[in-house]
Image: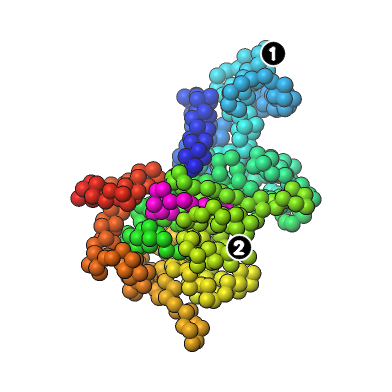
Amino acid sequence: MYEERALRVIDRAKRVHKILKFDKELVSYVPEEGWRVVEEYWLMEPFSKVYIIYNDDLSDYKYVVAEPELNDFELELLKWLKDELISYLESFEGKGEKEEIVKSAVDKLLKDLNVKLEEESYFKILYYIIRDFVYYGKLTPLMFDRKLEDISCNGYNKPVFVFHRDYTNLETNLEFHQDELDALVIRLAQISGKHISLAEPMVDAALPDGSRIQMTLGREVSDHGSTFTIRKFRDEPLTPVDLIAWKTFSSEQMAYLWLCIENRKNLIFAGGTASGKTTSMNAVSLFIPRKSKIVTIEDTREVMLPHENWIPLVTREAFGERGKIEMYDLLRAALRQRPEYIIVGEVRGREALTLFQAMATGHTTYSTLHADSVSGAIHRLESPPIEVPRPMLEALNIISVQSQVYIEGKRVRRNVEIAEIVHLDPHTKMLRTSTIFQWDSVKDRHVLVGSSKVLEDIRMHRGWSRSELEEELERRKAILEFMVEHNIRDFRSVSDIIHTYQTNPEKVLRKVS
């Protein structure tokens, strides 16, 4: 469940604050000439702080991490403690969380050395030891920053870059020399349960908090040396309400998707890299009825659902010549489990044919696809290596296209089009599509531009009149707007309201009205 990962992140922060409990501020920072601080916030108070700085002449922002400065004695003692801890921890018989074990070991070593430190020196040294032994070394403050989406290191002695939710791409003041970066990449692979070496220098993995990481080691595949890119896991997945509040979708679009998903229509989210495809797919999956049987299939766990009747499946690399489990294998296995909904992280290979066969046999499926338009998505599905026969594409009901765009100089995500697959012309063999919603880039709003065949199918199936269909859409739109207006955005509360509406609509409507 998503709560396990979220609680892991929250517990980690609580443990750090409990052990490193010190009231005096330990960091300070003065920007270089020409730069000024525009925002600052704590990551691990009072030990690490972020300063966003700006240069008017360069029109550029930077991300600066500030940590406590150590004097010569503290540096020497820190080095000695680290050297001793490497062998000491192997035989240390402590129980509890890693932070507590490391703290106990440090206290024992200091006692054996008969060193009594000032409180400030003690906590500064303990911070660096816990940072390096328990977490991610110099990278730790960035991993604690909830405003970061991506962290990228592009090689030896090169600045680490981050993608910040408020400032987009930023250069940081962190960089790693060769031995330091190689050691970090090997450590990141180890704590992800993976192996990386010069013989196998590329690894995709998931960190313990759920963040995705791609790593390369040495100069085998990158002239710049070892690299890594981390796509950070959110403490709590986004909801449809978040996407409406951020104007990624309109409430009218979400009401449409809610009705379509509840009535088991097939959907693919298309878009470029980092356009928010998986985020949107995860968010609208909250519309799946609570007790429906769901199977998710991914390379790395990203989809997080509140549903109890959910089987998450993940691919596996081979351990030697045998043992590799691909999406195709998992999808075939999933079909034997009689799921009502199948969610596939990304369509990109031979599993696509099986996925569309599943659609045609009544399994509702959702997935993502790298494509920038509806026509591009269809072309990609028909072309190698996916190669879905055109007649089978009729089983797909909806294509939702997302993109990163600029609004008033700020990069944001927008759904640019929702289209439906109407039918395959038997004479021309052309696949006809119909755009239902289009994004107006000038006014930054989503416009209803076409009539929906999918909604008409739902109306016929449910035995509604056209006015009843319109009323149902308006009710769902009103519920979504109510949650936006009252800032009801947390994952559990939103899913509870959605699922309560499915079983007891009057109860929710009374609350909204």
**The magenta stretch spans residue 41:** no
Residue 99 in view (yes/no): yes
Secondary structure of the residue carrying numbered label 1: helix
**The magenta stretch spans residue 289:** yes
The answer to whether 63 is drawn above or below residue 114 in the figure is below
Instruction: State which tag comes first along the sequence, 1 or 2.
Output: 1
Q: Residues within 10 Å of mark 1 (few under 14, many from 20)?
A: few
Secondary structure of the residue carrying numbered label 2: helix
* Residue 261 picture quarter: bottom left
Circle 1 sits on which residue?
A: 112
Residue 349: assigned label: none
Q: Nearer the viewer, residue 458 or 27?
A: 458
The answer to whether 482 is drawn above or below residue 365 in the figure is above
Residue 274 is situated, as x and y percent measured from the top left of the image, at 52, 58
Write down the region rendered in magenta. 285-298
Kind of residue indicated by mark 1? Asp
Residue 207 is situated, as x and y percent measured from the top left of the image, at 60, 43
Q: Nearer the viewer, residue 16 or 479?
A: 479
Q: Nearer the viewer, residue 143 or 263?
A: 263
Residue furthest toward the right? Answer: 199
How many labels were placed on the picture? Answer: 2
Query: In front of the other: label 1 or label 2?
Result: 2
Residue 351: assigned label: 2
For the residues bearing labels 1 and 2, Cβ distance under 8 angstroms:
no
